[in-house]
Image (cartoon, grey):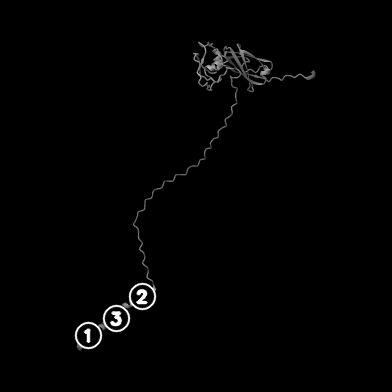
């Protein structure tokens, strides 16, 4: 028993000695013990805080860059040009009025109505017993047509349901009395010739009278028309002759250029199928004033 206990004691002593030797060996070789290592780690952790873990950056997958679209080549800047000014309209010069031939003055039937549309009596019918018809021509008048067919203007208007006797138009067909169309003479339209004063003369008298002579178509009547320098008109109807005498002091008193015409007329006072004569001109000096006799005979 004592022998066993001695062995155990010897074993314990050996183990303890081994541990002491191992500790000494460890100290000698510089290897810290476990408790020293733990102490050093605790001191380092208390001195410097441990860094927090850094979040890991996620790298997106690689995407290739889109190819660049080539830009358009810059064009050279436009050349500046001043705008063309709009030309202003030139003022239209006013026309100087010239004397016109008015064939409707004082001679009935010389110039008929042309464009107005005639009005008719409502419910009226043209006369059935008038079998002849007449188509209105240029410069016709109802009075001239009535005279041609031997009737009155009012009767002709009523027979054709015409309300206004002054309104007839070219091409209008009228019923007229009679059994046959009246005879219309043929006119020879010979050339006109002014005799006195001759065309363009400047030697007409300034007082007294002036006789106008001409040659032209043979017509029953003539209308002589003289345009004065101020635009006024003198006219006279003559029958069966180709001349007319005019009082200068009364009818041609002013100085200047005069223009005159002759119109051949039929018995109905309408111009025949021949053209008028003219225009012809003459120049007349100013008519001297008439001397006024002094009172009492003293100069």
Name the mark on residue 88.
Answer: none
Is 45 left or right of 100, judged from the image as shown?
Answer: left
Where does the image place residue 213, in percent across and percent down from the top left?
62, 13
Task: Answer whether labels 1 and 2 touch (C-beta < 8 Å).
Answer: no
SS label for mark 2: helix
**Is disc 1 placed on a helix, strand or loop?**
helix
Is there any visible trace of residue 274 in the rendered image?
Answer: no
Q: Residues within 10 Å of mark 1 (few under 14, many from 20)?
A: few
Q: What is the residue that sits farthest to the front in this orientation?
A: 123
Question: Dot 3: what SS?
Answer: helix
Q: Which percent across, then down, holds residue 51?
A: 37, 69
Corner quadrant of residue 149: top right
The residues bearing labels 3 and 2 have C-alpha atoms spaced at a distance of: 22 Å
Query: Residue 8 bears which disc, if any?
Result: 1
Labels 1, 3: front one: 1
Read off the residue under disc 3: 23
Residue picked out by circle 2:
42
């Amino acid at each position: 028993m004592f022998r066993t206990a001695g062995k155990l004691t010897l074993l314990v002593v050996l183990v303890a000695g081994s541990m002491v030797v191992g500790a000494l060996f460890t100290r000698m070789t510089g290897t810290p013990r476990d408790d020293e290592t733990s102490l050093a780690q605790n001191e380092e952790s208390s001195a410097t805080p441990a860094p927090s873990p850094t979040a890991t950056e996620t790298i997106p997958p690689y995407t290739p860059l889109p190819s660049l679209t080539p830009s358009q080549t810059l064009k050279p800047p436009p050349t500046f040009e001043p705008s063309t000014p709009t030309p202003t309209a030139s003022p239209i010069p006013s026309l100087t009025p010239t004397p016109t031939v008015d064939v409707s003055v004082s001679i009935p039937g010389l110039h008929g109505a042309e464009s107005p549309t005639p009005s008719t009596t409502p419910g009226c019918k043209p006369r059935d017993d008038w079998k002849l018809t007449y188509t209105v021509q240029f410069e016709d008048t109802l009075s001239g047509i009535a005279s041609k067919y031997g009737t009155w203007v009012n009767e002709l208007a009523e027979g054709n349901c015409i309300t206004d006797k002054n309104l007839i138009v070219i091409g209008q067909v009228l019923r007229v009395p009679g059994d046959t169309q009246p005879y219309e003479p043929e006119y020879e339209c010979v050339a006109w010739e002014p005799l006195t004063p001759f065309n363009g003369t400047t030697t007409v008298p300034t007082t007294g009278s002036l006789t106008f002579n001409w040659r032209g178509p043979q017509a029953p009547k003539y209308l002589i028309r003289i345009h004065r320098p101020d635009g006024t008109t003198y006219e006279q109807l003559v029958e069966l002759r180709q001349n007319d005498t005019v009082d200068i002091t009364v009818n041609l008193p002013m100085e200047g250029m005069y223009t005159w015409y002759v119109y051949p007329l039929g018995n109905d006072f309408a111009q025949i199928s021949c053209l008028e004569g003219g225009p012809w001109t003459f120049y007349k000096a100013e008519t001297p004033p008439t001397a006024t006799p002094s009172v009492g005979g003293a100069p």
